[in-house]
Image (cartoon, rainbow, N blue to C red):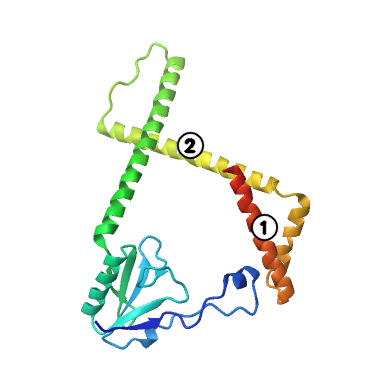
Amino acid sequence: MPYRELNVYDDPFPTLDQILSGDPAAPPFPQEVWRQKISPGEFAVRYKDFKTGRARNPEGLPVQSSEICRVFESLAEARSDSRQVSNKHWTVRCMIYDHTGAQVDSVFNTRETGKFAARMSLVLLLWGGFFALAGMALIWSIYRVALLLLAPGSQPIRSLTWLGWSAFAAGGLGIAGLAWWIKLRRNAGRTINRVRASFTEDEMKRFEEINTLFGTADPVERARLLALTREYQRRIRDALKDQA
């Protein structure tokens, strides 16, 4: 089926080095120009990763400034080609737009994305059940200890209504989630402190130069800024590897 391909953006994006250094000579971020090149009655297809929403091309590869769209003379042709692309590359979601830029349809591999969604749902259900049971066990343990200390002769609750069980499970999930979050925060704090400890005071003073060099127009200073930035990032990666 006939189609033509258009560049989505008018110019390339600034390079990573230009962004990191704040290069004042860096080109501005490009503008989308594909809509201006579509005639009434035509339909354009753009390609996105169905999990992240980031741009891809019809071959399923991630792209940025080189993103293209395919333009078809009818909606049926756009849908047909999109089905071929999504069947070949199931992670690609094909977004179909009319000449005004309004999205009129989306085509994706329902079979494969459905399998992925089912697997993720099962994983979330299993982890949710595990956390809920762990939290319920903790609540029950606290309840029994409190009962023994405060009312030694009392009998524990033997049965609950469905509403009681629901509240019990929700409380257990909430407590387990809070415990997991606290542990995550503690681990993150320890990691940050260990990374900081891997730098001497003289090194930190040297790396602080990154802040003062950012945005410099001097090519020599910009080269020094990029070198310092890459060294700083490498040191952080090495510190994190040592903790693994």
Looking at the picture, how far across and down is residue 148, in whole percent? 43, 15
Neighbor class of circle 2 (other Cα within 10 Å; few <14, some 14-19, many 20+) is some
Looking at the picture, how far across and down is residue 67, in whole percent? 42, 75
- Which label belongs to residue 119? none
Kindly report the distance in space between the C-alpha atoms of the residues bearing marks 1 and 2.
33 Å
- Which label belongs to residue 179? 2
Give the residue pinned by disc 1: 232
Secondary-structure class at tag 1: helix
Which residue is situated farthest in the left direction here? 76
> Callout 1, which amino acid?
Tyr
Residue in the picture at 70% in, 70% down? 223
Residue nearest the viewer, comparing 69 with 97: 69
Please state, as top left, top right, bottom left or bottom right, where the N terminus lies in the image: bottom left
Where is 156 relative to 134, above or below?
above
Please state, as top left, top right, bottom left or bottom right, where the C terminus lies in the image: top right
> Callout 2, which amino acid?
Ala
Left or right position of 172 against 231: left
Secondary-structure class at tag 2: helix
In terms of image quadrants, where is residue 19? bottom right
Looking at the picture, how far across and down is residue 14, in whole percent? 56, 75
Looking at the picture, how far across and down is residue 185, in whole percent? 55, 43
Where is 127 relative to 21, above or below?
above
- The answer to whether residue 212 is seen in the rendering is yes
Q: Earlier in the sequence, mark 1 or mark 2?
A: 2
Residue in the picture at 52% in, 76% down? 13
In terms of image quadrants, where is residue 147? top left
Closer to the camera: disc 1 or disc 2? 1
Residue in the picture at 48% in, 80% down? 31
Residue in the picture at 30% in, 53% down? 117
